[in-house]
Image (cartoon, rainbow, N blue to C red):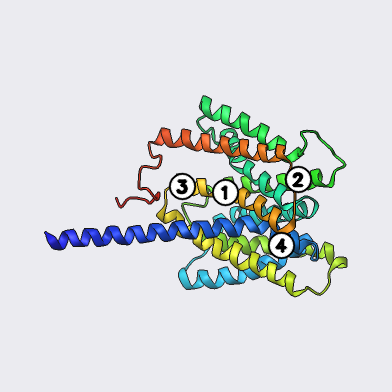
Amino acid sequence: MRENRAEVQAGEGLRNKKCVLANILMLVTILFWGVSYVSIKITVTEVPPVTTAAIRFIIASVLLWVLLKRVEPGAKLAKADILSMVLAGCLGITLYFYFENIGIKLTTAANASLIVTIIPILAIGLDILFFGARVSVIKLIAIAIAIVGAYLSVTANGQLDLNSANFVGNLFVVGAMLSWTFYTLVNKSLQNRYSGMCMTTYQTMIGTIFLIPLSFTERSDWQMLSLTAWGHILFLSICCSVLGYLFYMYVLKQLDVAITTLYLNLVPVVGVISGYFILGEHVLPIQIAGGAVTLLAIIVMNWERARYEKTWLVSSPLGCRQKP
C-alpha cells in the first residue's frame, strides 16, 4: 500500500514538473514569436523581405530535416498527399511570409502583431463556410466584435487611407493572415496521417523551394549581409521556426488547449511592447483598443467552446492534462 502511494506521489510529482516546464517553454515560445516581428522589421531594412524569408527557411529546412531523420527516420509522404502537402507549404510558408515580410517592411512591427489577432476569427469564419461548423449566438456576437476590433487595428485611425504606406503594409499582413487561415484548413486533411514534425518539415521545405525563385526578383537589392542581419535571421530560423515549434509541440502534449490558446493571445502583446521599447514605435490608442476588442472576442469564443465541451480549465491550477 505504501509502495503504491509512493508510486502515485512520484507520478504526480513528475507530471507537475512536466507541467511547470511546459508553462515555462510556452512563455519562451511566446517571447520568441512576439519579438519576431521586431526582428523581421530590423532585418528587412537591410535585406529585401522575400530574400529574408528565403534565407531564414533554407536554414530552418536543413535543421528540421536533420531532426526529422533522427526522430522519425521512416517518415515519408504518400503519393496521394503530395498535392495537399505542396498546397499547404505554399500557403503556410511561401505566401504567408511573402505577405508578412513585405507588410512589416511597410508598416510597423507593432501594427503587424496587432493584426495577427484576427487569425482565429478568420479560421472560424472559414470553418463555418467550408465545413458547416456549429454557430451559436455567442459566437456570432464575438465574430462581430472581432471584426470591429480588426478594422480599428488595420486602419489605425478608423479611416481608410489608401495612400498610406502603413495601411498598404497592414493589408499585406492581412493577406498573410488569410494565407495562414487557408493553410490550417488544408492541414485538416493531413493531421490524422502525419505527425506535426513530419508535416512541418515537409511543408517548410516545399515552401522554401517556392520562396527561392521569388527572392530572385529582389536580386538588384542584394548586398553583403552585416553581422546584425545574420544574427536576426539566425534568431528567426533557430528560435522562431525550429525551437519555437519543438517547444510548442511539447506544450500541446502537456497543457489543455484552452491554456495554450490564452498563451497565444499574448503574442501581439509582446509584439507591441517589444516594438515600443526596441524600435521606439508608437501605437495609436484606437489600435490598442482594436487589438483588445479582438482579443476579448477570442476569449469569449474560447469560453463558449469550453463551456460546450465542459472542459474549461478543469484539469489543474497550471492547466496540465490529467492522466487518463
Q: Identify which residue is drawn at 58% across, 47% down.
A: 184
Looking at the image, is mark 1 or mark 4 earlier in the sequence? 4
- Cβ atoms at labels 1 and 4 below 8 Å apart: no
Instruction: Note whether 72 is above or below 105 in the view shown.
Output: below
Looking at the image, is mark 3 or mark 2 earlier in the sequence? 2
- Cβ atoms at labels 4 and 3 below 8 Å apart: no
Secondary structure state at the residue bearing disc 3: helix
Q: Which residue is mark 3?
A: 259
Q: How far apart are labels 3 and 2 at the CA level?
A: 29 Å
Looking at the image, is mark 2 or mark 4 earlier in the sequence? 4
Question: Label 4 sits on what residue type?
Answer: Ala
Residue 173 can be seen, yes or no: yes
Q: Quadrant of residue 156?
A: top right
Residue farthest left in this picture: 1
Question: Label 3 sits on what residue type?
Answer: Ile
Lateral position of residue 51 relative to residue 207, left or right: right
Q: Identify which residue is drawn at 70% across, 50% down.
A: 110
Lateral position of residue 186 relative to residue 175, left or right: left
Lateral position of residue 96 relative to residue 123, left or right: right
Residue 129 point in image, percent of width and height:
60, 33
Q: Which residue is mark 4?
A: 53
Q: Which residue is mark 2?
A: 170
The mark found on residue 173 in the picture is: none
Residue 227 point in image, percent of width and height:
74, 75
Q: How far apart are labels 2 and 4 at the CA level?
A: 18 Å
Q: Which residue is mark 1?
A: 266
Dot in front, 2 or 4: 2
Secondary structure state at the residue bearing disc 4: helix
Q: Nearer the viewer, residue 322 or 20?
A: 20
Q: Quadrant of residue 59?
A: bottom right
Question: Label 1 sits on what residue type?
Answer: Leu
